[in-house]
Image: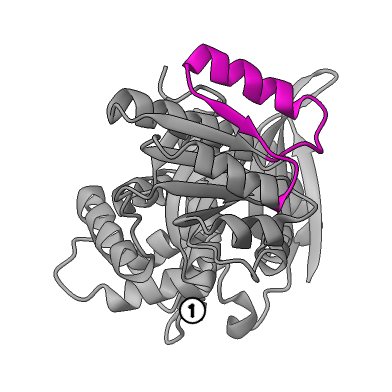
Amino acid sequence: MRIKTFQANSMREALRKVREELGGDAVILDSRHVKGLLGSKVEVTAAVDDPPPKAATGNFQKHIEAYTRWREQVLREQGSPGERRDEIAKLKEEVVALRRAMMGRREEAGLYGPQGRWCGVLVGRGVERGIAERWLLESGDGVDWEAYVQVKGCLKEWLGKVVPVYGDDGARVIAFIGPSGMGKTTCLQKLAVRYKLAKEWKVGLVSLDTYRIGAMEQMRSFSIVAGMPLKVAYGPDEAEEAIRSLEDMDVILVDTPGVGEVDEIVKGIGPDEVHLVLAANAKEGDIMEAVRKFGGLPVSHLLFTKLDETISPGTILNVAYATGKALSYISDGPRIPEDLHQATPELLAGILLEGSPLRRP
């Protein structure tokens, strides 16, 4: 297949260039407006020599969506109604040819029509295709796939079955572990304020993050402003003593370093919950390496930060699905405590389908 990109002042002109150079059998792969030194131009990517049906499988939805964009652009261009109809008819013929080539075959999602489109949405958000397919194939009958409310409800119900739901049922000692830079300290502070304001609990803080420059000063300043006692520990033994000194607290939140004696610390204090804090904007391979690195610890929950810094929130589902761990919280900004959200199936379904940050003005 020969692929080439063309630029022109209008969609009609770009399509004319495609036909002149690649011929009438060329297929449009993508189109967009680009800014140049002399103003905005239309950029069209086209290919010639259609692949066999099997090779084309999976691109069909992409062509359908692109066709919609092309049609809107053509209609906006200046020109006679007859010229616009000719261009639209040409594009429509290309799509029909692709549809015929696909008949009798399953798309990559294994589904056609609206279900296939929803599969494309999830995959576009970073969800592994196999996971998206499983949701669609297990969803059963009776779902109107054209109705967003029903689709979201269907996904919410399915997520509740495959991803353990966090109970937040009153654990007393909660440890936060994970690589440096994931946002452990900030998430701990958000949860501490939530417990104090929403549940009116007495919250104690223990910090062992003595490796990062400025980390201890950050915790000390927070404890003073929030009115929460802070104990600083420099190793497993001091951590145990710090927790014993806070026995009159309703909940104790423990901040651990990203390096050092994390294993000994966690095993020594025996927390009721261990939340592995990961960044949603990190590469999935790096996230799974962190899961492997901390896999020897009794991790009970996954907590994801930096949702507002990624366009692939599906990573959250992929990792939870692969590890079988419950999602506890999702963070999408620096505000305390507003930007920390309990990871309910409904919330996760909305993130995966809408792909928008959770933050509100």
Disc 1 is placed on an element classified as helix
Q: Residue 111 placed where, x, y %? A: 39, 75
> Label 1 belongs to which residue?
102
Q: Residue 63 placed where, x, y %? A: 54, 59
Return the residue found at the far right: 37
Q: Quick check: can you spot residue 33?
A: yes
Q: Residue 178 placed where, x, y %? A: 66, 51
Visual colour scheme: one colour
Does the magenta-highlighted stretch encompass residue 147?
no
Q: Quick check: can you spot residue 313?
A: no
For residue 242, which quarter of the picture?
Answer: top right
| 120 shown above or below 231 | below
Does the magenta-highlighted stretch encompass residue 219?
yes
Residue at 28% x, 57% y is: 156
Q: Which kind of residue does numbered mark 1 sit on? A: Met
Return the residue found at the far left: 142
- In magenta, the rendered stretch is 208-236
Relative to residue 260, is residue 66 drawn left or right?
Answer: left
| 308 shown above or below 327 | above
Residue at 67% x, 64% y is: 294
Residue at 77% x, 36% y is: 210
